[in-house]
Image: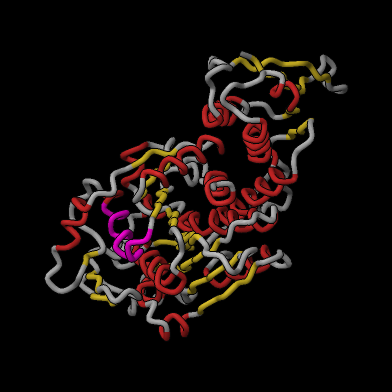
Amino acid sequence: MSFRLWAKAASANKIKPLYKEMEVRCDLDVKNITPPQLYTFLLESLEKYDELSFDFQSFLDLEFKNITPQSLELVLYTVYSHYSSVPFSSKKEQKPSHKWSFEGSISKTVENLVDAILKARQLQECPPNLLYPKKFVERAKEMLSGLKNVSVHVFDQKALLEKKLNLINEVGKASENPPYLMVIEYLPNPNEKSKALVGKGISYDTGGLNLKPGSHMSNMKFDMSGAASSLAVVYAMAKNEVSENLRVFLPLAENCVSSNAYRPDDVIISYSGKSVEIDNTDAEGRLVLADALSYAAMEYSPTEIISIATLTGAIGYALGNKYGGAWATSEESWRSLHDSSIAAGEWIWRMPLDDYYLRALKKSRVADLKNSARTGAGGSSRAACFLKEFVLGLPYVHLDIANIAYSDSTSVSYAPMVRTLYYYLAERR
């Protein structure tokens, strides 16, 4: 199978450039290739071409058996946008490393979704001294300004204390940049129930008093990727005027070191009323998520709660850097999520959501739960099971994107699961 692209090649005199038709070979069978396979192939094989023009029609002419025209359009335009844009740079002169063009008509739906992905990547790559919790709130408000059926509610540190959102406050209180909880409502049908999406927004994670070593602290600006992806999803839904309701909850904090930082052995009463003993301050993401999950469940009774977070390093040991980890309390939710990921061109793998993993967290002598266990075995599923304790028995889906949010070697962002969650929330019936 080959795709027709146009690559720029230097002429003999290196003055007048020539364009030549180029075939990019792919060993995958056109009858069986799926959107995730096509996305991965294009992302990996086209990076070397500095100047390139996508011929959309040449892809359509291949008549893929397992890829719809909309999925094909989304995959191609996402790859094009990934290499033809620069999410963040403070250089005096900055030009995209790839001068690509796209030949063909793009639907407004896909254009808005890819625009949302780029906005999420811009947030991901923003340095932590420029994107702390308050600045994230300001950027999000600016991004959502003027969109129909969207309202934003922001709880500052004083409000967190008044509402007893203690886990969020404890994680963020050591920073000079205080924590927030941001609630975004997209309600085109306000008389109907909504789903809830909760995204982890740790703008920087030092590990707290359980301080990370230097090599592990690098790239911790990406620890807010769950919040960035969640914001992008609701932005895309509003831009495309999707009929489904959605509420998004973004707990935002910096996990820092100070004399008033929360400590191992502290016991904190969560919003749900459950007490949590701190075993490790570097397991902070599940704490801010726990309060946000309980707040969503108790205040709004959503039909389903989804969380997305760069939650555990363990997910990378389990799945490498290809698949995101997924947990679901129902087979129906898993099947729908998996179908959405295939259509979106993203890889996910289901992980066990078994109370077996809670045993070590329930051994506290002074609290209902510990936030971490001394064993690293099964760490990703243990974290997911911890979160499930705070959704009040509601249908629940969790995505751990710690291994796929960015490239550890190049610090390039990917805005993971925006496409998958958009399909899951906007087009699921």
Q: Which residue is drawn at 35% across and 73% down?
A: 167
Marker count (numbered): 0
* Quarter of the figure that contains the N terminus: top right
Q: Which residue is drawn at 24% across and 46% down?
A: 378
Task: Answer left or right for 213 relative to 364.
Answer: right
Asked whether residue 186 appears in the rendered view, the answer is yes
Residue farthest front in this picture: 191
Residue 174 in the image: above or below residue 314: below
Residue farthest right in this picture: 16
Q: Residue at x 58, y 17 (%)?
A: 30
Q: Nearer the viewer, residue 100 or 119?
A: 119
Task: Answer left or right for 291 relative to 31.
Answer: left
- Quarter occupied by residue 170: bottom left
Q: Which residue is drawn at 53% across and 44% down?
A: 420
Q: Is residue 277 magenta?
A: no
Q: Nearer the viewer, residue 418 or 94?
A: 418
Q: Nearer the viewer, residue 221 or 244?
A: 244
Residue 64 in the image: above or below residue 398: above
Task: Please name the colour scheme applied to the rendered image.
Answer: secondary structure
Q: Where is residue 59 in the image (x, y as percent from the top left)?
A: 69, 23
Q: Is residue 387 magenta?
A: yes
Residue 118 in the image: above or below residue 368: above
Q: Position of residue 22 (x, y in %)?
A: 72, 16
Residue 131 in the image: above or below residue 51: below
Q: Where is residue 93 in the image (x, y as percent from the top left)?
A: 73, 49
Asked whether residue 83 appears in the rendered view, the answer is no
Q: Position of residue 12 (x, y in %)?
A: 82, 14
Q: Give the range drawn in magenta.
A: 382-394
